[in-house]
Amino acid sequence: MFTSDLAIAALGVPVDTPSGGDVVPRPNGIYCHYKAAADGNTNVEAQLKDMTQAEFEALADTLGATTPIQGVGSIAFGRSTSIMGIPGAAVAAWSNGRGVTVSINREGADQAVMTAAAQAIAAAVLLASP
């Protein structure tokens, strides 16, 4: 489960109430988005979607998440910027027919902390999904 505690750890500041909904434009998925209470450009989002491993691998490649990660789902990749290419971190992980992407947008933060936070969020989301 992607909680506000995980979002606060990722962003290092208090967060607003999360927004969420269906993943668009693709069906069969959900997302949860937290933004920093004082800065809407500092945010973290997780998207969870049913997909095959081949679909996951194509998505990870499209997102530029190409660095292999161990210990998160059955297979996972990361990158050292957000999915938008700005300072932050991103992780794509897959397990049991579900893929999750996590993107953190945060300037001026320790890269190792953001990477660890993105991995923790991905692992929590995959563990919480049936």
Image (cartoon, helix red, strand yellow):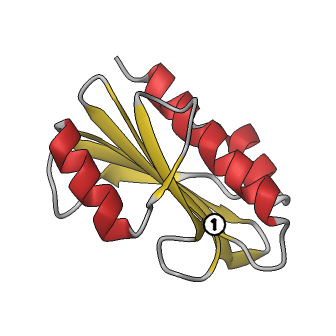
Residue indicated by mark 1: 43
Image quadrant where one finds the C terminus? top left
Residue 67 in percent (x, y) is at 51, 57
Residue 48 in percent (x, y) is at 35, 42
Secondary structure under tag 1 reads: strand
Q: Is residue 128 visible?
A: yes
Residue 71 in percent (x, y) is at 58, 29
Is residue 122 shown left or right of residue 60?
Answer: right
Image quadrant where one finds the N terminus? top right
Say which of 69 and 27 sits in front: 69
Residue 77 in percent (x, y) is at 47, 50
Is residue 119 shown left or right of residue 20?
Answer: right
Count of all numbered marks drawn on residues in the image: 1
Q: Residue at x 17, y 44 (%)?
A: 54
Residue that extends furthest to the top in the rendered view of this protein: 130
Q: Amino acid at mark 1?
A: Asn
Q: Residue at x 41, y 69 (%)?
A: 64
Is residue 89 shown left or right of residue 65?
Answer: right
Q: Residue at x 29, y 68 (%)?
A: 62
Q: Residues within 10 Å of mark 1 (few under 14, many from 20)?
A: many
Vertical placement of residue 73 versus 87, above or below: above
Vertical placement of residue 62 versus 58, above or below: below
Residue 24 position by quadrant: bottom left
Say which of 124 and 40 sits in front: 124
Say which of 113 and 40 sits in front: 113
Q: Is residue 46 visible?
A: no
Residue 52 position by quadrant: top left
